[in-house]
Amino acid sequence: MPHPELLRDTLREVLYGPVGLRGLFSEPGQGLLHAAHAFTAAQARAPHSGQPSVAARVMTLRQTLQLTAATLADPHALLGDPTDPRTWAPADDAAWRAELVALAGAGQALYDALYRPLSAEGLREAHGAVVQAAREAAVLRFIRDTLPAG
């Protein structure tokens, strides 16, 4: 399987979970988007064990995916969103939902960009973004699983 096709399959699994019974990164239905949608706006705003908030993690990843997709199309692309994830927090549920929609859009943009002819450097950039997304999905699942009940 060529690298871009394997990378697209990996990104799809990271975003949505594996198609079959098992995957490399998660169980069926346990992808990044599922993990992120499990948080309310209030939970996303709250810091977790001295680490960045879920909202900050999601925005950082969304910006990474967007920038990687843009860079694959134009190596001189700049980040289009100047918002600093370290200080951003969703004011309400609507703002949190909008960020989740933007995250899904960024994942789709990267997926679409992987259909372009990619240089070795572009493949490395894309691999890095997919690995970061896989890591963040695991972190979000861990945070979700360690939240107090109720």
Image: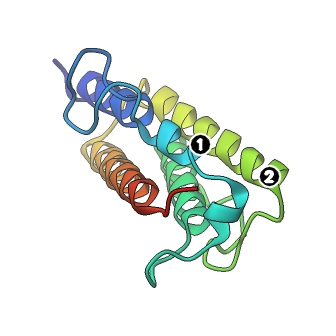
Q: How many marks?
A: 2
Residue at image x 72%, y 70%?
Answer: 89
Q: Residues within 10 Å of mark 1 (few under 14, many from 20)?
A: some
Which element carries disc 2, helix, strand or loop?
helix
- Please indicate whether residue 15 sits to the left or right of residue 94 in the image: left
Which part of the image, by quadrant, shows the N terminus?
A: top left
**Relative to residue 150, is residue 8 depicted above or below?**
above
Q: Residue at x 46, y 30 (%)?
A: 111
- Say which amino acid is labelled 2: Asp
Image coordinates of residue 34 in percent, x first then y, are: 50, 37
Residue at disc 1, secondary structure: helix
Residue found farthest to the front = 150
Residues 47 and 126: in front is 47
The residue that appears at 20% across and 24% down in the rendered structure is 22
Could you say where residue 44 lies in the image, as x and y percent from the top left?
Answer: 62, 62
Q: Earlier in the sequence, mark 2 or mark 1?
A: 1
Q: CA distance from mark 2 to mark 1?
A: 11 Å
Which residue matches tag 2? 93
Quadrant housing residue 116? top left
Give whichever of 149, 5 is nearer the camera: 149
Amino acid type of the residue that numbered disc 1 sits on in the rendered structure: His
Seen in the image, is 100 located left or right of residue 19?
right
Q: Residue 48: x and y, percent? A: 49, 74
Image quadrant containing the C terminus? bottom right
Q: In the image, what residue occupies the spot 68% across and 79% down?
A: 87
In percent of width and height, residue 95 lies at 80, 54
Q: Mark 2 Cα within 10 Å, few/some/many (few <14, many 20+)?
A: few
Q: Which residue is mark 1?
A: 37
**Where is 49 relative to 143, above or below?**
below
Can you name the residue that lies furthest to the left here?
1
